[in-house]
Image: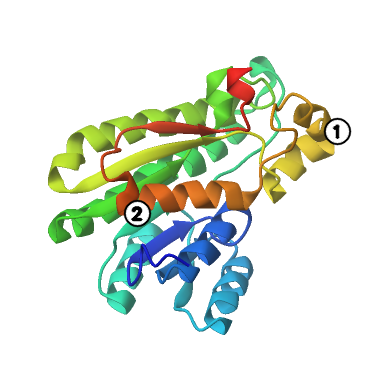
Amino acid sequence: MSGKLENKVAIITGGGSGIGEATVKLFAAEGVRVVVADADMAGAERVAAAVRSDGREALAVQTDVADWSQVEAMVRRAVTDFGRLDILVNGAGRQVHTPHIVDVSEDEWDRVMAINVKGVFLCTKAALPVMVAQGHGNIINISSASVLEGDTFSVPYSVSKAGVEMLTKITSSQYQRKGVRVNCILPGLIDTPGSQNVEGKLGTFDSFVKTIPAGRAGLPGDVARLILFLASEDSSFISGSSIVIDGGRDAR
């Protein structure tokens, strides 16, 4: 433990599994008081309970990030219980396999966009007034390396993640001068429940791994450590950036 974030307060959406869970646990080990936000309350409470069992502070908040009233309540709970909000990690997302464009249903398109883009927008919108009033804040958004090559496994997913990247740039340009840094992470293949539910079930997970120069899929902890760097003062001169973490695949 480095203590780089000691006594900071963070909200981590999608904190009940995968990259979000790994980030919650890493942040808590660094002394962060964490709000574990997830639509799956059982998952959020499981992760928060594990943090508390280690003597750290965490609370679980059931949150549909596409619902403004629930997002407002999430931010209000963080400020009420912990006094402020220093870090927001927008990790909640919907990863699905879809057919080509003409066969994608409007309902599936709307569901993915609601969580992956609208959710990031709403959480950012709710957190910014608190951060601006404090004079400081840090937002880390999770996009995807799929935006780099137009992956066809899911049209709405790839398009939504491109939207997250642009939202990152715009938010940074509008709010960095007010003390809020905003950055974006583009993970490649990470071994999470989401990727196993898509690439694993499609039987493409192992074949994709063969295209990664690092010789393995990423782990949630790999991404969590990058999030920690972006949340700390070690990255104080970085804002509006998109950072790829894909085992070298994009540089093949």
Q: Of helix, strand and loop, which one carries label 1?
A: loop
Q: Position of residue 85 (x, y in %)?
A: 29, 63
Residue type at mark 2 is: Ser
**How far, Cα to Cα, is label 2 from label 1?**
38 Å
Q: Quadrant of residue 151?
A: top right
Name the residue at 63% across, 32% down: 247
Q: Is residue 171 visible?
A: yes
Q: Is residue 68 visible?
A: no
Is the residue 72 above or below the residue 149 in the image? Answer: below
Q: Quadrant of residue 57?
A: bottom left
Residue 91 as seen in the image, left or right of residue 153: left
In this view of the protein, which residue sits in the foreground, 181 or 147?
A: 181
Q: Decide which of tag 2 and tag 1 comes sooner along the chain.
A: 1
**Applied colour scheme:** rainbow
**Which of the image's four quarters has the C terminus?**
top right
**Are circles 2 and 1 on residues that touch, CB within 8 Å?**
no
Residue type at mark 1 is: Gly
Is the residue 164 above or below the residue 140 in the image? Answer: above
Q: Of helix, strand and loop, which one carries label 2?
A: loop
Q: Which residue is mark 1?
A: 203
Q: What is the number of the mark on residue 232?
A: 2
Name the residue at 21% across, 32% down: 173
In this view of the protein, which residue sits in the foreground, 198 or 28?
A: 28
Q: Residues within 10 Å of mark 2 (few under 14, many from 20)?
A: some
